[in-house]
Amino acid sequence: MGGEEATLARKGDIEVIAAGCSKDSKDVPRVPGPVWPLWKLILIALPQLGVQVLWCFIGPNSAPYMLHLGMGHALATLNNVAGPITGFFTGPLIGAASDSCTSKYGRRRPVILAGLISTWIAGMLFSGAEHMFSSKTAALAFAAPMYWVMDVTINILQTPHRALVADLASQDTMDENSTVGVA
């Protein structure tokens, strides 16, 4: 560690460096604050486990629900590509939006809350499509796009949450524990 980096580490400050940027760049954001211990980071990251369980539940259960509403087998299975496709576009857009958020509650928390509320609403609408419409065709016409909306809202929920954990972790913590994510 160089002089400035060692000073930051001794003070307990967190230095956030964008990948590919030099540490001497003027546009490198620095977020002062304490270095969070690993156990606190695990507690903060724990809701991400719930999001992963949600993905594990939606994946295998959406196709049978779509089949129940009258969708063909091929389309019901093909509808599961919504998660990766919407995540490819939603992740960077929501990440940039949460990076520039200037709320008094922080950069990430308002977007996480909006994602949580919108995921709940979209999930209720998707799962209740059968009960909201009298015909299966109308329910299917509503549920199929609602599934894609629900996938977008889940991505809105999880993208800033991952960034929040990364914001709070010191560079040393990220380096020491990066193999946990790979294993």
Image (cartoon, rainbow, N blue to C red):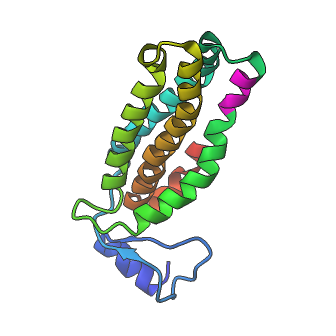
Q: Is residue 57 left or right of residue 125?
A: right
Tell me the residue at 51%/87% (across/down): 25
Residue at the extreme right of the image, as rendered: 74
User: Please, is residue 3 above or below residue 148 in the view?
Assistant: below
Q: Residue furthest left?
A: 104
Picture mark count: 0
Residue in front for this viewpoint, 158 or 126: 126
Q: Position of residue 169 (x, y in %)?
A: 41, 58
**97, 14: nearer the viewer:** 97
Apparent side of residue 143 relative to residue 75 in the rendered image (left or right):
left
Q: Position of residue 121 (x, y in %)?
A: 37, 33
Which residue corresponds to the image point at 43% horizontal and 44% vertical from the top-left? Answer: 157
Judged from this view, the residue extending furthest toward the top is: 68
Q: Residue 106 appears at what percent x and percent y?
A: 28, 61
Q: Vertical placement of 123 versus 105: above or below?
A: above
Residue 179 x/y as whole percent: 60, 48
Q: In this rendering, is residue 173 above or below 66? A: below
Left-right relation of 68 to 102: right
Tell me what residue is drawn at x 58 percent, y 17 percent: 61
Whether residue 26 is in magenta: the answer is: no
Name the residue: 40% across, 43% down: 45
Note whether 40 is above or below 49 in the view shown: below
Q: Quadrant of residue 97?
A: bottom left
Quadrant housing the C terminus: top right
- Which residue range is magenta in the image? 75-80
